[in-house]
Structures are given as structure tokens and as C-alpha cells.
Amino acid sequence: MPSKRSQPALGFERRVRARREDDWEPESDVEGESSDEGASEMSVDGSDSDDAPSASEDQSDTGSESDESDTHDEPAPKIDLSAVSFGALARAQASLPPSGRRAQKTHQDTSTAPEKSERREKSGGGGGKKTEPRPKRSSKHAPQGVDEAKAQRAYAFLDEYRDSEMAELRAQIKKAKDPAAKEQLKRRLMSMESRRLARQRREDGERLVREHRRQEKELVAQGKKPFYLKKSAQKERLLTQRFEGMSKGQVDKAIQRKRKKVAGKEKKELDFLTRPRDRH
């Protein structure tokens, strides 16, 4: 007969003895300790559980980095530009951000705009008066204004050079035998003489204006009222000065040239007025 196995004692058959209330205190302490131990175990388990998501996040980060590296390693698809329309290319170019230099320039303009407005407000230039634009120069090294008096003094040697060139032309005209070449030299000489005469008349007019201004300053210093010299008065004074330095024959020639000039001008005006009638 097989022997029956003896079952382990579970503790339910032992006798229970009644205890006093004082006897329950150590049990509560024991239970508190056990609860504290359980709480500590729970905290340890919780920390382990908290560490678990961080590990999962690390795994996800590494997975995303690996995906990005895979996407970077993949070659970009090639586009056949011949099949794309010009309108699509223009729209794509317009959607692109501006280049570095252009973006930097626009940023500088926007950053300096408030400073310019503040300067304008401080100087009081934001009123109704409009500032005239400065004249443009062909080069940043070129001066804006030119002093004619200084320029004349600096280039005075050119007058001597022109006089010597005119003397050479007169000698060539005397020696020339070809009528066409002689006529060409004469036209060249007349052009140089007319330019010299115009330059001399302009200098005479400027000299006359300077003299008149000097007289006005003297009148103001004496307490007298100055007078304005009109253009017509300037012409009269210039003519009198010009004829005073001429001989009688030179004056007659000058008057004849003036008459011819006026007659030619009147003839041109008359021809211009009579041409429409001839066409009809």
C-alpha cells in the first residue's frame, strides 16, 4: 500500500489566543515597517518603470536618426527641366528665399530706416519742403562743382596752343594748291576763330557782371541803394565796350556781318512760313 503523503501545515489548525490592546501596538509597528518597506519597494519599482519610457524614447530617437540617415543617403530624384514649363519655373523661383547678399541688403535698409526717420525728425526736415535730389556724377571721384576761374587759370596754356595751331593753319592755307583741301583748312580755321570769339565774349560778360557787383557793394557800403543790371543793359554795355576797342573799318565790317546774319535769319523764317502754301 502506498503511503499517503503528509500535507504541510498551513497554520489554520493552531490555537488562537486573545490578546490585549497593548499587544497590538508592536504589530502595528511591524505593519508600518512592512508598509514602509512595501512603499520603498514600490518606489523602486516606480523608478524602474519611469526609466522604462526613457529607454523607449532613446530607442525611438535612435530609430528616427537612423531613418533620417537613410533618407539622406538616398539620392535625390532627377527632374527633367525640358519637360517643365517656364511658368512653373518662374513660380518656383519666386517661392525660393532671397539670396544671402540680397537678404542682407534688405535687412540693412529696414534697420537703417528708423534711424533716418529719427534724424529727419530731429533736424525738422519732415515738413512741407521737399529736398531737391543731388546731381548724379559719372564717377564718385569726380567733383560736383567746377570753379570756372580756377579752371581758366589752370588751362591757360591751351590758349597759346590754339593760337599756334591757328597760325599753322593759315600757313597751310597759303601753301595749299588743292582747292578741296584748301577749303577744308579754311572751314577748320573759321571754326577755331568762332570758338575763340565766343569764349572771349563770354569772358567779357562775366567780367562786366563782376564789375557791376563790385560797384553794388560799394554803394551798399556808402548807404546808397544798389540797382539790378538787366540782360538788355548788359548787352548794351558789352557792345559799347566792343566797339570802343575797334577801328572804324572793323566797326563797319562788324555791322555788315550783323546785318547779313539778321537777313539770313529772316529769310529762313519766311521760307518756313511759305512752304505749307506751296505744297497745297
Image: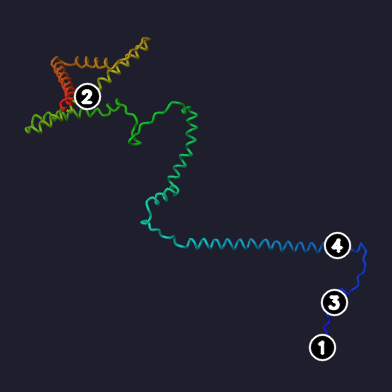
Quadrant of the image for the N terminus?
bottom right
Q: Amino acid at mark 2?
A: Ala
Kindly identify the residue that appears in the image at 41 percent across and 49 percent down: 91
Q: Position of residue 108 (x, y in %)?
A: 46, 41
Between the residue at mark 4 and the residue at mark 3, the CA separation in whole angstroms equals: 26 Å
Q: Which residue is mark 1?
A: 2
| Lower sequence index among marks 3 and 1 | 1
Kindly identify the residue that appears in the image at 89 percent across and 74 percent down: 14
Q: Nearer the viewer, residue 191 or 31?
A: 31
Query: Element under label 3?
Result: loop
In the drawing, what numbered circle is on residue 198? Answer: 2
| Lower sequence index among marks 1 and 4 | 1
Name the side, left or right, on which 51 lies relative to 89.
Answer: right
Name the side, left or right, on which 50 lies relative to 150.
Answer: right
Name the side, left or right, on which 49 lies relative to 81.
Answer: right
Q: Say which of marks 4 and 3 sits in front.
A: 3
